[in-house]
Amino acid sequence: MKNKLGLLGLFCLIFCAISSAAVCQPFYKSRAEIYDSWHICRTRPQGIDGYFQLSEDKFHPLIVFESLGRNADIAYKLGEEFRARYPDSYQRAEAIYNFVRDRVRYTHDRDQFGYAEFAQNADELVQEINKGEARGDCEDYAVLLTTMFKAAGYRTAIVLIPGHAAALVFLPGYPKARTFLTFSQESGWIWAEATGRRNPLGWVPQKALQGQAIAFEIGRAEELVRKPFPKGEITEIQRKRRIISISPFFFIIFIMWIIPMISRIFLVSFLRRGH
């Protein structure tokens, strides 16, 4: 019996899938696009209702303000905790950056939500961090970092380059910065690229220095107000299952271990029936 339970447990550990779960807040669907309770489109950055209100030469990251001001919640409180814990501004910025980098796994939106684009707000991502299941792509990292930097007392911005979003933090004199960027005629801004697990704070992708970039500083909190949903349009957004994989090496070890165990189980069962 113990062997059977051990076998079942091993199968579960190696081949089980993490169950899908709904994003906590409700959404509604309109013309194939997904909107949240602030009537911000989560599946499109462009347009007046897009999560970044992106146009040809400017943008306005509305989704950031879902976690600031009157809407401040767990992400903002987390940033405040870092401010209290780290009095040194350089150490605090590094701690916030490392926290996000090390706890969010880069995942394309289509692989997680089934949409080519689906932006998460900062609080939704922190909820997933607290469960140990946080996944996101570039705009999700940028939104969470700017929210936490803002709460921790920094000037911060979101920056866009073609096909990519990142965070900026104003940290003049930071000794580990690869490059100080100039934004709003002020030098001292550094790039926060947390999408790579080995990227330190201040690392800048080469394409960011070659192409055109536009940035938006997160200033005074804009008071977004939740609005009623259209009748009968509420929908639920599910995160796709994430299969736990096993390396070829451990798979071979598993096969070498399981065949003798199965043989012993069947042999014991056969002998018991014989008696």
Image (tube, rainbow, N blue to C red):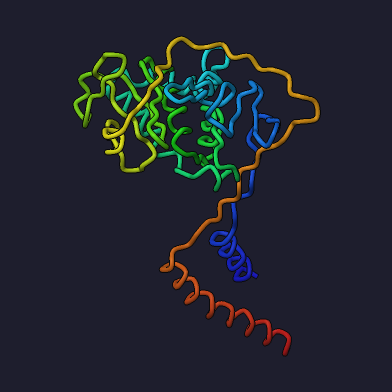
Q: List x then y, in percent, for residue 146.
A: 42, 23
Q: List x then y, in percent, for residue 67.
A: 53, 20
Q: Is residue 268 above or below residue 131?
A: below
Q: List x then y, in percent, for residue 91.
A: 29, 25
Image quarter of residue 21: top right
Front residue of 43 and 148: 43
Left or right of 238? Residue 249 is left
**Identity of the residue drawn at 46% across and 9% down:** 220
Left or right of 102? Residue 75 is right
Q: Is residue 245 above or below residue 229?
A: below
**Identity of the residue drawn at 34% across and 27% down:** 213
Quadrant showing the C terminus? bottom right
Q: How many marks?
A: 0
Front residue of 35 and 74: 35
**Identity of the residue drawn at 49% across and 12% down:** 221
Farthest-out residue, bottom: 274
Image quarter of residue 51: top right
Front residue of 234 and 5: 234
Farthest-out residue, front: 56
